[in-house]
Amino acid sequence: MKRGLFLMLLAVVLMLGTEETAQAAVATIDLQTESETVRVGDEFEVTLLITALPVADESPKAAIIGDFEAYLIYNADVLEFVTAPPCITGGAGMLRIMDMGAGASEGNRKYVIKFKALERGVSDLSLDSRPIVYTYGMEQAMSVSSNVLTLAVEASVHASDNANLSALKVNPGKISPTFATTIREYEVTVPYESEMIVVSALTEDENATVGVNGSTGLRVGRNTVTVTVTAEDGTEKRYYLFVTREKEKVEPTKAPEPPKEKEEFEAGIHAELKDGVTELTVAGRFKVSDEPGAYIAPTGYEETVLYVDGVQTKAYVKRDAPESDFFVLVLEDELGNSGYYRYDREQATIQRFDEERVEIRQVLTEDNSSLYEALDKYKSRQVILLFVLAMFFAFTVLLLLIVVSLLRQRHTDENELDGH
């Protein structure tokens, strides 16, 4: 009994295994088109054909095509998607094929997709790496293989074959000889500092394109720059620029100039009278200001006379130290700047005098006649004012004396009347 039940279960398992194995199949996807060469502007159809075959000695049911899922890739710069069955959507280089819930297709199934050729070039049409073809009525995927369809898009029959330039310029430099459409080779010289050259090229046909190669990374010496013109129909023409980059200019090395010898001065201070002007020499040259009234004595100093090398020089010395070795001089340096300097007679040195603020009264070099007239008038008015004040004072004193005299006389008269 038990042995019979075991044999029955084993038979069922074997039957199920046989049924599953019977569903195995191989699907081949073939991308086809009427011509693998089209022209710009043409619309054409691509057929996606699925063919399924059962594995040898297996049931034909395994090759019945059911649901289908895949992605179709193409070059969107060359081709443009136009129309397809509703189960195919997308664009811009990728179409999604999602045919789910499809009916049974025995042996094969096809999808027709329409494209338009946009411009010259080549485009491969291929399915992504994992397209899925299901056996109808079962969630079992077939083994799938597919091809790659290569399409070449040529120029339109009306496309221009004009690959000529109408103008050619460079920067920096200038081409030689002068540009002409029929001349294909030119010479250009650029300075050492230019590692690249900018090429400006204008085509005779507006649909032609220009490509420049070799214009950067110029080496010292001769370089070749290629200007390629491609006509609308693909015809190419090349112009050549032989660019010579100059060598680096090395400035000749100048011999170093010998250092200027500094003017040497004898130690100490020396004086010399030149054209009525006293010049002092002590670590530099100075002139002694001889303009009377140009400067006044600094605060706490008084004017004195200093003799240097027998030349009399005006100087200032402190009032409370007339025997001091320090003097203040009014000097003008070699740049024409004048001011007070302190001279140390013992050390024979001169330096700017800035111990305290010094009042400086500059001499007016222009005509001072009007100033003197104003001063005279001012002085005259002072005299008149003083005279008026003196007269007023005298008149007041006289008036007081008269009043006092009258009071005394009155007092005397009153006394005499009292005596009688």
Image (spheres, rainbow, N blue to C red):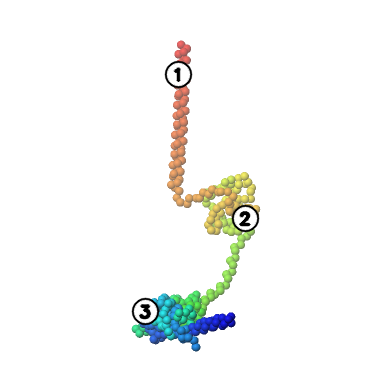
Percent x, y of residue 180: 38, 82
Look at 45% across and 31% down and name the residue there: 392
The residue wearing badge 3 is: 206
Query: Which of the labelled discs sits on residue 410, or is there none?
Result: 1
- Which amino acid lies under the numbered mark 1 shown in the image of this protein? Arg
Query: Which of the labelled discs sits on residue 16, or is there none?
Result: none
Q: Alpha-carbon distance for marks 3 and 1? A: 137 Å
Within the image, what quadrant is residue 260 found in? bottom right
Look at 60% across and 65% down and name the residue there: 261
Residue 410 visible (yes or no) = yes
Dot 1 falls on a residue whose secondary structure is helix
Look at 45% across and 16% down and name the residue there: 413
Q: Earlier in the sequence, mark 2 or mark 1?
A: 2
Q: Earlier in the sequence, mark 3 or mark 1?
A: 3
Look at 36% across and 82% down and name the residue there: 42
- Which amino acid lies under the numbered mark 3 shown in the image of this protein? Glu
Q: Residue furthest front?
A: 1
Circle 1: is it few (<14), some (14-19), or many (20+) Cα within 10 Å?
few
Q: Alpha-carbon distance for marks 2 and 1? A: 85 Å
Q: Is residue 290 left or right of residue 150?
A: right
Is mark 3 in CB contact (under 8 Å) with mark 2? no
Q: Nearer the viewer, residue 243 or 362?
A: 243
Percent x, y of residue 269: 61, 56
The residue wearing badge 2 is: 349
Q: Alpha-carbon distance for marks 3 and 2? A: 88 Å
